Amino acid sequence: MQIVIIGSGNVAYHLAKAFVLKNIPLAQIFGRNTENLKKISEELHVPYSTEHLEDADLYIICVSDQSVESVSQMITKKNCLVAHTSGSLSKEILIGGYRKASFYPLQTFSKSKNLEYEKIPFFIETETEEDKKLLFDIASQVSKNVMESSHEKRKYIHLTAVFACNFVNHLFSKAKEISDSQEIPFDYFLPLIDEMVQKIHEIDPKSAQTGPAVRNDVRVLEMHEQLLKDESLAIYKTMNHSIKKMYEL
């Protein structure tokens, strides 16, 4: 089977690396960023191009959601399977006479961070049983966690991921702004963060909640509000309101 990955960003890099590590052959990595493609090619020993798209049986599109539709129109081959890696788009966004699918890896990807690929969940959606089996077989070589998911279900998977990952990381960034403003090393907070994350491996997140809001400690809440302003104050109030509502305080 000939496989081509389209893209040169974080998802494309990690998917290509995962395939190479599991000896899943890649015919090409295709994209428009020559510098990124060259780095990936040199590290993984996979051919790349910014001009000629190789003939393949499976094309996996790893680009931004805004670019998926236009990139999909570059694939003119009819007898092939094309899958995007978006968590929010339907497979119908793909424009062409080929077979369409979704191949969604649920993870936050950064090129500078190594990942344990076997732990990454993959969610598959296809038009036929044959294509489902094909993508399941490929994903199962990479990961221990592969399941079928409709677009409707995948929208909720993606929404959950935004709350659990993107929003949490933004709060880490806001926390670091506060610690930096007082010249307190943010590293000092890492054991606290690590313990919180580890805790939800063992108990339900709702049961793991601590802090002044769940205790309804009005004195501490008001003191914190006096230390904040503008956007950070609004976030603080919104989060505390949500916590109180969850625990009916």
Image (cartoon, rainbow, N blue to C red):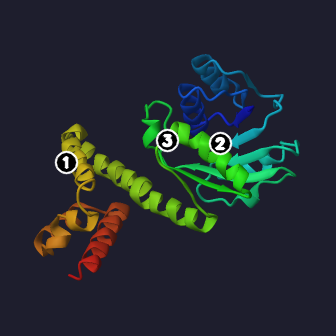
Expressed as whole percent of the image width and height from the top left, the position of residue 197 reads 27, 51
On screen, residue 245 above or below 60: below
Q: Secondary structure at mark 3?
A: loop
- Residue 52 horizontal side relative to residue 158, left or right: right
Instruction: Count residues near mark 3 (Cα–Cα under 10 Å), then give few for <14, some for 14-19, many for 20+.
Output: some
Expressed as whole percent of the image width and height from the top left, the position of residue 112 reads 46, 30
- Residue 123 horizontal side relative to residue 240, left or right: right
Name the residue type under label 2.
Answer: Cys
First along the sequence among labels 2 and 1: 2
Expressed as whole percent of the image width and height from the top left, the position of residue 152 reads 60, 68
Q: Which residue is mark 3?
A: 143
On screen, residue 56 above or below 230: above
Front of the two marks 2 and 1: 2
Which numbered circle lies on residue 99? none
First along the sequence among labels 2 and 3: 2
Q: Work out whether residue 170 or residue 115 is closer to the camera in this orientation and state it.
A: 115
Q: Work out whether residue 153 or residue 43 is closer to the camera in this orientation and state it.
A: 153
State how far apart marks 2 and 1 are (Cα): 35 Å
Q: Which residue is mark 2?
A: 62
Residue 31 seen in render? no
Q: Are marks 2 and 1 in contact (CB under 8 Å)?
A: no
Front of the two marks 1 and 3: 3
- Residue 107 horizontal side relative to residue 93, left or right: left
Name the residue type under label 3.
Answer: Ser
Q: Secondary structure at mark 2?
A: loop
Q: Work out whether residue 10 or residue 78 is closer to the camera in this orientation and state it.
A: 78
Write the residue at 87% across / 52% down: 97
On screen, residue 42 above or below 50: above
Which numbered circle lies on residue 192? 1
Q: Residue 91 lies in what quarter of the image? A: bottom right
State how far apart marks 1 and 3 are (Cα): 30 Å
